[in-house]
Amino acid sequence: MGFSRWTKLRRALFATWKLLLSFRKTEWELKDYPVDTVRQTAPANNDARPEWRKIPLFRAEIINWPGVSATGDTQFEAIQKLEEVFQNVRRKRNSMPRPGRHEPIDIQFADRERIAAHEHLAEEFTREVLGLEWA
């Protein structure tokens, strides 16, 4: 995402501040992490779209922790949903990273064996559900 220099500096300072504060305790909640909300730009026809295709107005994310984010129509709603995502991550992990530290993203790709067995369904899904005729 292309943030301005000022935004990058603000986020880095905020993450550093949360990192320093994190040494006061060993168990962290979402409020201990550097959370930022970003107003997203929705297309002009966003209100005319079906509910499942509307772009929420706000995204909340934990700074320096790619992949841990949530969206909502208000900042409050986005942060509430981020709390749910955060709790799901906490249940799946043995230990949580220290607030403010960079957490590398761990991407695991699914096995393509079953998709290859039904290639026509994958093509139909791409065309009909995703609406990507060119893919």
Image (tube, grey):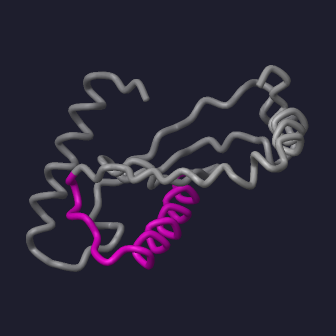
Q: Residue at x 89, y 40 (%)?
A: 120
Q: Which residues are magenta?
A: 75-101
Residue 19 location (% of width, % of height):
15, 58
7, above or below 73, in the image: above
Residue 6 location (% of width, % of height):
26, 26
Residue 105 location (% of width, % of height):
37, 50
Dominant SS in magenta: helix
Q: Is residue 64 magenta?
A: no
The one of 109 and 25 positioned closer to us in this rendering: 109
Q: Residue at x 14, y 49 (%)?
A: 16
Q: Quadrant of residue 45?
A: top right
Q: Quadrant of residue 13?
A: top left
Q: Is residue 80 magenta?
A: yes
71, above or below 45, in the image: below
Q: Residue at x 57, y 35 (%)?
A: 40
- Could you tell me which quadrant the N terminus lies in? top left
Number of disc labels:
0
Task: Tell me: 85 left or right of 57.
Answer: left
- Could you tell me which quadrant the C terminus lies in? top right
Task: Tell me: 100 left or right of 124.
Answer: left
